[in-house]
Amino acid sequence: MNNIGKKLKNKFNNFVYKTAQYPATSTAKNYELDKIGNSYSFCMVPKGYLDSTSIIYSFGAGEDITSDISLIEKYNCEVKVFDPTPKSIAHFENLKQSIRQGTDFFNDQGHKYEMSTPSVIDKIQFEEIALWKEDTRLKFYMPKDKDHVSCSINNIQNTNDYVEVEAMKLSTMMNNLGHEQIDYLKLDIEGAEFAVIENILQENLAIKIIYLEYHYLDIDKALSSTRAIKNSLKTLMSHGYVIIDNDRNRYFTLIKS
């Protein structure tokens, strides 16, 4: 394909992604939402549903856990954070060390971490485990740009380099941590969300609120990628979830009705 063909293809894909018609957000109840975090690392939480006793699981830390820290600050809760990515593990360890030393530490966007007290970091339990549809060890493929952090199980960037990591079903993690339900589940897992959501629904796990980012299965196949997102959302809705927020046709907040 020549340069003109590539530009036309990119325009078509961008148009499809921006105009894709996903299931509508719920109007049955006036859900007020809080935006927790900063302009880059944030999540949406319906008001009145979380407190200090809430069980929160967050998958996909990357090199910015601002939203996880903000959840702790907002609700005085604990957050279980999961990410086996080497850069993510190093980032979290360096953050903890900086807090102990009383020095500033910055996320990958150059923003300084702000905490009301150093003890906030103690409310994060970091687990070096990947979330998947089965308990296994698998290849975690590195991003094309070595300066980037996000690895993927599905190799959505078509790279050859990988690390082997431990992966578990959500039900296994919950059992290991002694939890029968999750109040807030945050997913940013680079394309693995499709299989993970299917497994969660198959096992009928008790999850009240889900905030997730959908990734494109193939950036150059807009129609099939948007179809996969639509099917995943419809499956969630068929299991009692309603969509209460859609941000940029990729970030969705759902609540079990």
Image: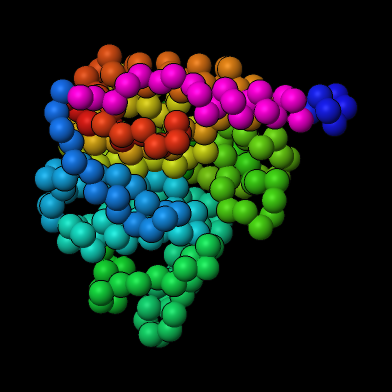
Q: Where is residue 6 drawn, in percent x and y?
A: 78, 28
For the point 50% across and 24% down, which residue is it?
Answer: 19
- Whether the magenta-drawn stretch holds residue 22 is answered as yes
Q: Is residue 118 above or below residue 2?
A: below
**Which stretch did the figure color magenta?**
7-27
Residue closer to the observer: 72 or 35: 35
- According to the image, what is the colour scheme of the structure? rainbow
Residue closer to the observer: 26 or 136: 26
Name the residue at the right extreme. Answer: 2
Please give left or right for residue 129 compared with residue 116 in the image.
right
Q: How many marks?
A: 0
- Looking at the rendering, in which quadrant would you find the C terminus? top left
For the point 38% across and 58% down, which residue is it?
Answer: 38
For the point 29% across and 50% down, which residue is it?
Answer: 35
Question: Can residue 127 be seen in this snapshot?
Answer: no
Please give left or right for residue 199 compared with residue 223 in the image.
left
Q: Main secondary structure of the magenta part?
A: helix
Q: Quadrant of residue 206?
A: top left
Question: Can residue 100 be seen in this snapshot?
Answer: yes
For the point 47% across and 40% down, which residue is it?
Answer: 189
Please give left or right for residue 68 compared with residue 5 in the image.
left
Q: Quadrant of residue 70?
A: bottom left
Q: Where is residue 78 drawn, in percent x and y?
A: 23, 57
Q: Is residue 70 above or below residue 224?
A: below
- Whether the magenta-drawn stretch holds residue 118 is answered as no
Residue closer to the observer: 31 or 140: 31
Q: Where is residue 22 drawn, in percent x and y?
A: 41, 20
Residue closer to the observer: 180 or 41: 41
Q: Quadrant of residue 188?
A: top left
- Looking at the rendering, in which quadrant would you find the N terminus? top right
